[in-house]
Amino acid sequence: MEPRPPPAKRLRTSSVGGGYRRNYVFAHNMEQQRMDLPIYRARAKLIGQLRHLDTAIIIGETGSGKTTQVPQYLYEASIGGHGVIAITQPRRVAAISLAARVSEEKKTELGTLIGYTVRFEDLTSHKSKIKFLTDGMLLREAMLDPLLRRYSIVILDEAHERTIQTDVLFGIVKSAQRKRKELSKMPLKVIIMSATMDVDLFSQYFNQAPVLYLEGRQHSIQIFYTKETQTDYLHASLVSIFQIHQEAQPSANVLVFLTGQEEIEAMSKTCKQIAKNLPQGSCQMSVFPLYASLPHLQQLRVFQPGKKDCRKVILSTNIAETSVTIPGIKYVVDTGMVKAKHYTPESGLEVLAVQQVSKAQAWQRAGRAGRQHAGICYRLYTEEEFEKFINMTIPEIQRCNLSSVMLQLLALGIPNILTFDFISKPSPDAVQAAIEQLEQLGAVEHKDNQISLTPLGKKMAAFPLEPRFSKTLLVSPEFHCTEEILTIVSLLSVESVLYNPRAQQDEVLSARRKFISSEGDHMTLLNIYRAFKNVQGQKEWCRENFVNSRNMMMVAEVRHQLRDICVKFGVRLESSRSDTSNIRRCLAHSLFLNAAELQLDGTYLTLDCRHQVAIHPSSVLFHFKPSYVLYNELLHTSKCYMRDLCVVDPDWLYEAAPEYFRRKLKGAKT
Ligand code: CDP
Ligand code: MG
């Protein structure tokens, strides 16, 4: 599908009633608000159509009411009978906040009629009839019951995001629907929703499912491009922010799309400094960063009404593109950049890097400007550049390491993952590389030309973790350090527990000093967790030490759940206490595919494919140069950086995967 033309040209703007605005701002009557949503006018027709269709695709502008209303309409019309309505979201923050919103609209307590299930958190009961889940969680449920018998309707929302889990779910849900029909079981209704997507591809994949278009009632949005190519998008956004600030009414808020936490924190600091020095009497500016690992209370500040005569400027990652909705935005500044994962199967490298957005993403961003009033979007690129953007974001399944998904598909009993009915096929090389990785981790084996899970692999699939982390847990008894590994894996499974505001850099450094371990970031995090436990998770302690207390509580909860799974498998829970080498040795046994060695010239090369990498400045090892390190991920900015590092002994790497390393480490040992 060609991406949409600018909303300004296409959308009806004449019917923008003042009523919508009034009701939105003075949110006192939820029922009225529901009736004011664009989707409400289509309610009866929509219910009529959905009642008879097995599969449907619903397209409608963001904010038209798809996510919050469609599940309620289906429930209110008793479509689907006694079964549960599942509605998936690509991100946990969206699943939680939407469940809360719908529950409020229905005047029920969250977790009763309406609940949510996200990784490590389940707020549902046997009474729940509408259930918001992350796509990953529905996939996990499918592992236990491939026919998804509990559900009468599955709504796959934000389908255009094409996360790896959503893509696999398309296949799983489609097959569950077919099998239930063959077995004459309760039919499964499948609804796919999005604001922007390749409808032809989806319709074709889902047996020519009809596409239902909802008429939007968004306001007009003017799009401005730069006249010339911008070489520095950060500088360009700064200039745009202050240009808007000089010209626009104080009530007009600005949303700026940047790529990541560090960039946002730096920009926030600069904006605040400039704003402080503006002439007296001019409009004030308050600047709010917004990214996934920001402490929750600070995230909430973005949504609260601003002070009078003070402009809100929100600097956000693409979390504001689809997952969260910020009221009161009139201006959007789109840098056209996003941080995304890329995977090269030949080299085995999975790298996070900043890249251009797709046209679909750019439209989605622009759409954030016209929710309550007519809006303006400044694109910090030329129209010619925009025309060269790819139409749709490349689905994750075609640009990520597939080992997690392959492990799940094998656990689902998919006989031949190479012929699985993917909506977009991953490359055979990527599938092959994933299988090899799983083989190296001891999760799969080849038997009679068939790939199957080993007993270890079966256990690994039961953990809601990446294969390398479930492997670490399962081998930890050999090193007598399961308690510590549980903590480390939990710390790596939630959003960052460290909060690093740029404006207080010196305070952050001095507070962190006491936890730093010369053995790396994993050990440092372990020290922080231990200290947090020693003070019983005191909020004050967290504030003083720049620790995100909410995320830390989450770590404790995750740890608890992982510990339960370990107990179920009879994993011996021992603590290595002060012996940290055992912990690092254990990590070497599962992260050995992510190892790098120091070269004579002071650079690092990965052992897997001898790619040049460097230690990320945020690592505690930045000023040290250990000979061998393990890393969690690679981030490409000005160079390829390793993040979250652990110092290891090369002998441990040999010991972990002798055959694999015989070749890789040759020469380095001399
Ligand atoms: O899914 P879609 O983008 O079509 O819209 P939605 O998520 O159902 O949201 C419809 C409207 O509900 C939004 O425009 C907001 O006015 C409101 N809403 C809200 O106020 N708070 C939320 N957490 C979610 C929605
Ligand atoms: Mg939605």
Image: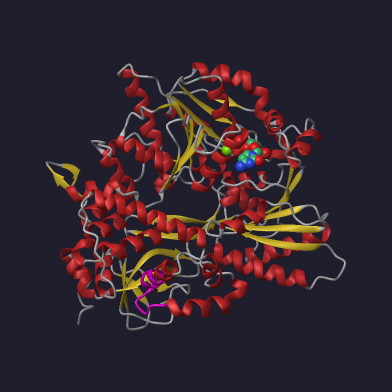
Q: Find residue 529 and report its horizontal and vertical position in percent.
A: 41, 67
Q: Residue 202 magenta-drawn? A: no
Q: Of residues 370 and 251, which is closer to you in this image? A: 251
State the image quarter where residue 582 is shown. bottom left
Q: Find residue 474 and report its horizontal and vertical position in percent.
A: 24, 56
Q: Residue furthest left?
A: 448
Name the residue: 72% across, 55% down. 254
Q: Find residue 186 and report its horizontal and vertical position in percent.
A: 38, 19
State the image quarter where residue 356 is shown. bottom right
Q: Of residues 670 and 544, which is closer to you in this image? A: 544
Q: Quadrant of ligand 1?
A: top right
Judge whether residue 195 can be spotted in this image. Answer: no
Q: How many marks?
A: 0
Q: Residue 523 magenta-drawn? A: yes
Q: Quadrant of the C terminus?
A: bottom left
Name the residue: 43% across, 76% down. 515
Q: Quadrant of the N terminus?
A: top right
Name the residue: 31% across, 38% down. 143
Please provide the residue range marked out in magenta: 516-527
State the image quarter where residue 204 is shown. top left
Look at the picture and state if 505 lies above or below 223: below
Q: Of residues 625 and 378, which is closer to you in this image? A: 625
Q: Find residue 117 and report its horizontal and vertical position in percent.
A: 44, 41
- Left or right? Give the position of 231 relative to 90: right
